[in-house]
Amino acid sequence: MPGCRSNDVGPVFQCPTCGSEVFKRRAREFFLCRGQCGHRFTEVKTSFGCNRCGARFKEVNALFQPSYIYSLNEDLKSELAEAVSELETAFSGSPKAARVPA
């Protein structure tokens, strides 16, 4: 997690040999490092970078926070249970067709 505690982070793809962040994909089979070594590779090394302060960190040091939290509308709970039950019946091989409200 960056020291500024920003949530504005993104992946940073690096060359596994020299750690350069600059590379380009060549065809479908490999990446080519355009940094220090010019190495060809099929898998990139991934870390994360803060778009605010520029700090770099590994995924194990990231703090994941939920962006959205969903809850079920209590008024629709019975209707949803019925629709799920009908879907379970439909997928279990029973000839009954499922009726899912729009």
Image (cartoon, rainbow, N blue to C red):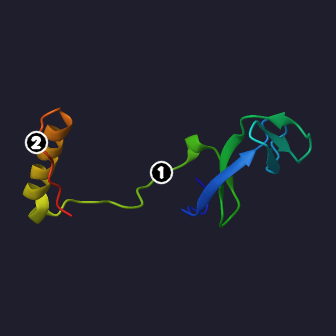
User: Is 90 positioned to the left or the right of 23 in the image?
Assistant: left
User: Is 71 positioned to the left or the right of 81 in the image?
Assistant: right
Q: Position of residue 32 (x, y in %)?
A: 84, 42
Q: Residue at x 56, y 61 (%)?
A: 5
User: Is 96 positioned to the left or the right of 57 in the image?
Assistant: left
Mark 1 belongs to which amino acid? Phe
Label placed on residue 64: 1
Of label 2 and label 1, which has the lower sequence position?
1
* Marks 2/1: CA–CA distance: 43 Å
User: Is 33 positioned to the left or the right of 65 in the image?
Assistant: right
Q: Position of residue 52 (x, y in %)?
A: 65, 67
Question: Element at badge 2?
Answer: loop
Q: Position of residue 96 (x, y in %)?
A: 10, 42
Label placed on residue 97: none
Between marks 2 and 1 in the image, the one whose residue lies nearer the viewer? 2
Q: Residue at x 32, y 60 (%)?
A: 69
- The count of marks equals 2
Classify mark 1: residues with Cα within 10 Å, few (<14), some (14-19) or many (20+). Answer: few
Query: Hey, which residue is sitting farthest front in the picture?
Result: 95
- Which one is in front, 77 or 57? 77
Question: Element at badge 1?
Answer: loop
Residue holding disc 2: 96
| The quadrant where residue 3 appears | bottom right
Give above or below for 73 relative to 93. below
Mark 2 belongs to which amino acid? Lys
Give above or below for 53 relative to 99. below
Q: Are marks 2 and 1 in contact (CB under 8 Å)?
A: no
- Which quadrant, please, contains the C terminus? bottom left
